Image (cartoon, rainbow, N blue to C red):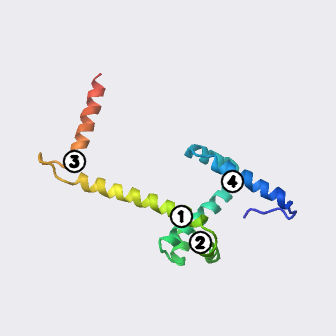
Amino acid sequence: MPQVSRYPVDRKVEERMFEVFQKAISALSDRSDVESFLHEFLSPMEKIMLAKRLSIAVLLKKGLDYDTIQEILHVSPPTIASVSLQMKYAGSGYKKVVEKILDEEHVTDFWEKIQDALANIPHSKGASLLEQRKKRQKEKFASRKAF
């Protein structure tokens, strides 16, 4: 686990460090920029640690129990409890991020279900919409190959 220096930083310096850090994070809007920054900024262990904490929060919000989370993520019950306490009693930061993740997941699930339902609807010509789309894609690819 990462260690923090035992030599404390002046309070004002610490506040300024966090201000700069927050601005740096919020300035990253492109996914590849975020990925690049995190890859270079965090050690592999730090990335895993942070990703596991966020995953614990998402799984708790989904209603999974400690044993299941422990089995899936290979984390200890105290780690799960720590995340749970943060989500219950701390500010809204954790909650907002977790809700955003779950909202995006629900939207993706919704559109996948719609697409699946539409794909299986038989068309008047007998083939499903999915089969028709695949046939059109093959024809389009074949026509490009001809040139």
Give the mark nearer the N terminus: 1 vs 3: 1
Identify which amino acid the numbered label 2 is placed on. Met
Identify which amino acid the numbered label 1 is placed on. Val
Label 3 to label 2, Cα distance in Å? 44 Å
Q: Where residue 119 sits: x, y (%)?
A: 25, 51
The crowd level at tag 4 (other Cα within 10 Å; few <14, some 14-19, many 20+) is few
Give the mark nearer the N terminus: 2 vs 1: 2
Q: Where residue 77 sits: x, y (%)?
A: 61, 77
Measured along the vertical axis of the image, is residue 19 above or below residue 89? above
Furthest residue in direction top, as rendered: 147
Q: Which residue is mark 1?
A: 98
Q: Which residue is mark 3?
A: 129
Label 1 to label 3, Cα distance in Å? 36 Å
Label 4 to label 3, Cα distance in Å? 48 Å
Give the mark nearer the N terminus: 4 vs 3: 4
Give the mark nearer the N terminus: 2 vs 4: 4
Identify which amino acid the numbered label 4 is placed on. Gln
Q: Which image quarter: residue 145?
A: top left
